[in-house]
Amino acid sequence: MSYPITRLRRLRRTPALRDLVAETSVRPADLVAPLFVREGISDPLPIESLPGVVQHTRDSLRAEVAELAELGVRSVILFGVPAHKDAVGSGAFDPKGIVQLALTDLRSDVGDDVVVMADLCVDEYTDHGHCGVLDESGTVDNDATLEIYGKAAVAQADAGAQIVAPSGMMDGQVAHIRGQLDDAGFTDVAIMAYAAKYASGLYGPFRDAVDVTIAGGGDRKGYQQDFRNGREALAEIEADLAEGADIVMIKPAVTYLDLIHATRARVNVPLAAYHVSGEYAMIKAAAANGWIDHDTVTLEQLTAVKRAGADIILTYFARWFGELARSA
Ligand code: PBG
């Protein structure tokens, strides 16, 4: 051989060698399970575009969280599906709103053993499907929406949420929510900010899950980010940190690994990534057709999100991963 060969294959020879030198691992405790709870149903309802995910009743939700905890998945984030929607999304801040009731149920079951979070937005609760209240021209009114987010944060904290996760992409939402929580005495309730959230085509199955249709065939491009922009995500993250975010999130995950990586290098708080409904559905659909291998692709994607720099992953695969880890 007239030239030197760099021998990198030596450490790839056996499973034990590969495990020894693995740089990244995913643990069930890194995962947050997104869970849907629907008002007024007596049995869980499957969500067609999210195979294996259901709209829970209050009781089936309690059972699911207990089973997740058994599997080592010790964080959940709740989304509510109310029986009635209105212009301002009252169900989001009503003490008897479905998520508030579910938060109280769960905290009485699991106490501090599971981290119980609530998504903080109004799109599930508004009759027009937007993440805020509308002004006369039909545009989402930023500052009027903040008032509602503040009330929702206090209602969720009061019901037992340990973390609230504002997802509406209103300017100033973290500062306003922090202020309202502190004023109400909830200084220990943390904020996980959906800091960089893109107007993505990958939220479709989620909207089925929460029965949301945006009025008039509208979209969220007036508040969620344009996927042509990366630096803007860093500006969003800096703003949320300055306003008091405890955890920042990037959403979706796999199409934004560049931003997860860039953010990890810049911030010193925990970084979350949301592997969203469309990312889940794509794997499920292709695997159901036999075109890709479900387990291999799922592990590859979750690991890639961690390798890019995320500490926490919100994923509909949380239960699957917990079961896999248990059987390993
Ligand atoms: C807004 C919210 C959405 C998701 C999480 N929070 C929907 C949206 O912005 O339209 C999407 C999550 C997913 O697709 O899995 N409350």
Image: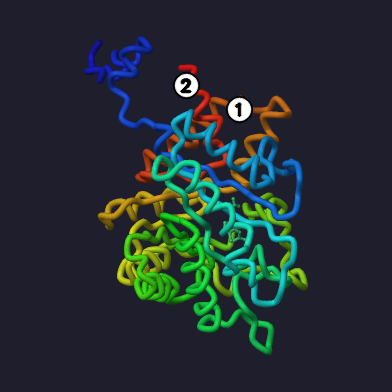
Q: Is residue 236 visible?
A: yes
Where in the figure is residue 30, as x and y percent of width and height? 40, 39
Callout 1, which amino acid?
A: His
Numbered label attached to residue 326 = 2
The response on whether ligand 1 sits within 8 Å of label 2 is no
Residue drawn where x is 70% and y is 37% of the image = 51
**Mark 1 or 2 closer to N-term?**
1
Out of 211 and 140, give the one closest to the viewer: 211
Where in the figure is residue 46, as x and y percent of width and height? 74, 41
User: Can you say which quadrant of the picture contains the N terminus?
Assistant: top left
Callout 2, which amino acid?
A: Arg
Q: Secondary structure at mark 1?
A: helix
State whether residue 3 is above or below residue 140.
Answer: above
Residue 108 left/right relative to 25: right
Numbered label attached to residue 294 = 1
State whether residue 5 is above or below residue 104.
Answer: above
Where in the figure is residue 72, as x and y percent of width and height? 44, 31
Where in the figure is residue 80, as x and y percent of width and height? 63, 56
Out of 5 and 268, give the one closest to the viewer: 268
Please identify the quarter of the rendering in which residue 87 is found. bottom right
The response on whether ligand 1 sits within 8 Å of label 1 is no
